[in-house]
Amino acid sequence: MKQIKLTKVNLEKLAANPPSERDEYRTDIPSCYLRVGPSSMSITVLRRDADKNQVRVGISIDTLNLPNLPALKRLIRQAKESDSHSTKKEKRLKNSLRSAGEYVIEAKQLASTTESNYLRCLNQLVIFSGDKVPVKGVEILKLHKLISEHHGSAGANSALKVLRMVMKAMHADDESFPDWPTEAVRGLWTYEPPRETRLSTEQLPLVWNASLPDHWSQWVRFALLTGMRKSETKKAYIQGDELVVDNTKNGTRHRLPLTPSIEKYFSDYSAIKCFKPLTKHVQSATEVRTTPHDLRRTFASIARMAGVQQSTIAWLMNHSAGRSSQTDRYQGRPESFILSEALLKIEETYKTLGCER
């Protein structure tokens, strides 16, 4: 039997070039097989039922709308769970913070980037709590102090927000699970200054025209022209006359018109593993401290300066909260020529401020 590694790239290749006859592959996941036909794709999972008999569980895959890999692996894990494990699972969820946290995070079906952030926070909670679910407010206060000492106040806030989410979600399903003690931890959160930094009109041309090593100069201009999140720049691809990003932070498919300038600075940025060097390179070249998300906020500011309507800015930036009114829902996504004109206005404003093409 043929073997295949279960990745999004391999699934896309098989969906784009299906075999003329039905093929079956053994995947890198134990007891999991991929079946591909001329017009269909499915996964078969083998497991044992309560009587120890082998059972086949099928998972169909839409070749026109392939699921992201975390969601697909989540379905495979669920298919592997037999009825005999349900009682053990309930006990494990009550006694293990990691098990409860992973259960809640999986159930929310988050975007892959958000899910990895939540799991990182969960790992911190497990380390400092000994994998025990805190019952009293005193235990949570102590946990916040321990995480603050090692990861700072902002890291502690993020971890405790995940803990609150897990405890509330589990308590809603099972009242015997400890609930979040709102009153006992009132005033717990450390003050975090609002993250509203952006490049000023004086700093913008310095950063745009800066000579940065490797691919950073090109990436900075691409980020400023599109307003994309750093994770979106890594997943963007060209489809026809549009720039497309699948499975964004808010779970939607983001599409932008492809202007000549955006096409010029577009590249495959998926190889970027860490964006921390960007801040160091920019500060070394310009003495301006900036982060990838500062560039996104700068895009929004320049769009407003260019006279772009607020609702259009929300669509350009893939902000679901900015288009939540009833009128916006009725109107839907603006026509492509409207988004294209808005992007061109933004590019002209950059040029006016001294950003060379």
Image (cartoon, rainbow, N blue to C red):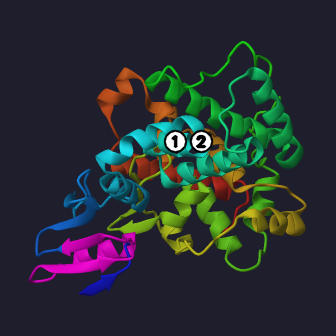
Residue at the front extreme? 51
Task: State the image quarter where residue 19 is shown.
Answer: bottom left
Identify the magenta region.
7-35
Closer to us: 26 or 53: 53
Residue 270 position within the rendered picture, expressed as x and y whole percent measured from the top left: 55, 71
User: Dot 1: what SS?
Assistant: helix
Mark 2 crowd level (few <14, some 14–19, many ≥20, 10 Å Cα): some
Residue at x-position 76% and y-position 49% = 199
Residue 162 in view in this figure? yes
Q: Are marks 1 and 2 in contact (CB under 8 Å)?
A: yes
Residue 345 position within the rendered picture, expressed as x and y whole percent measured from the top left: 53, 50
Relative to 17, residue 260 above or below? above
Mark 1 crowd level (few <14, some 14–19, many ≥20, 10 Å Cα): some
Closer to us: 38 or 122: 122
- Identity, as a three-letter code, of the amino acid under mark 2: Ser
Residue 107 position within the rendered picture, expressed as x and y whole percent measured from the top left: 43, 41
Closer to us: 230 or 172: 172
Q: Which residue is mark 1?
A: 92
The tag on residue 143 is none
The tag on residue 96 is 2
Residue 258 position within the rendered picture, expressed as x and y whole percent measured from the top left: 43, 63
